[in-house]
Image: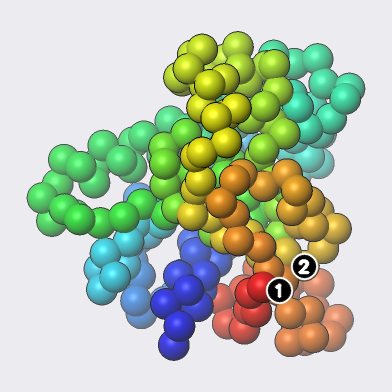
Amino acid sequence: MDKDDILIKESANTAISAYGVRISNDNIRVLFPLTNYKSGFAGIAKVDDIDKRVFVGNCGTNSLLDLLSWAMVPGLTPISMIPGFSQVNDSRSFTIQVENYVSSHNEYSGYKIIQTGQSWGETLAQINSWERNQSGVGLDGPGAWTYLNSTSYLLNNPKGLSAAFELSSNTKKIDFISLNASFVGGWWDFNIPGTRSGDIDMGLWPKGSINLFWNHMPELQLQKN
């Protein structure tokens, strides 16, 4: 099996697990159990000991209130007046917690951290990938480039004023894979630089399965551009 295919399937497994769905996979195990935050963010971390990868799963939109909050994220909609977004901060904190755990345990020396998420979770994954220089895989979600270039982000981010230079330098590229199946995930122009984009083959989905994403994502065959 192609290494990208294994990476995508294990990323998808972790992304869906961030919704609280129990999905087994013989190649990966839970490193950090599902952690829920007051903001509505939820995160989970899984590890592949064969390929030495730690997957950070960012939960996507999981309620109407969550959707309304997402719509108010600065830089993603013109109506936004909120200067920050708590789920972004909580996602960042969860990533740092996983990073610190991995770096402080010798058994994870050489392991690579992979960001992943579905729907709004992909946006969070792209933000973390950009800020932490980590690879990632996103599934059917909008990119984070508009948000990262917003005035709100530039005034409220971990790197301070240096973030503006990094964003405008046109030299930084992140190894991120964005796979899409709907108009939401079709905003490829808004992905972070370095993103490889492709499609989830809808023809492989069982007809009439409204819960396909939650039940079958790890088994989907994915085609990449």
| Alpha-carbon span between mark 1 and mark 2 | 5 Å
In depth, the one of 16 and 162 nearer the eye is 162
**Which structural element holds mark 1?**
strand
In depth, the one of 189 and 54 nearer the eye is 189
Against 3, is 31 above or below? above
Q: State left or right for residue 138 relative to residue 49.
A: right
Q: State left or right for residue 160 relative to residue 177.
A: left
Task: Point out the residue furthest to the right here.
Answer: 79
| Residue 78 shows in this picture | yes
Mark 2 crowd level (few <14, some 14–19, many ≥20, 10 Å Cα):
some
Circles 1 and 2 in contact, beta carbons < 8 Å: yes
Percent from the top left, x then y, of residue 44? 44, 51
**Which structural element holds mark 2?**
loop
Residue 181's tag is: 2
Amino acid type, residue under disc 1 in the picture: Ile
Where does label 1 land, which residue?
200
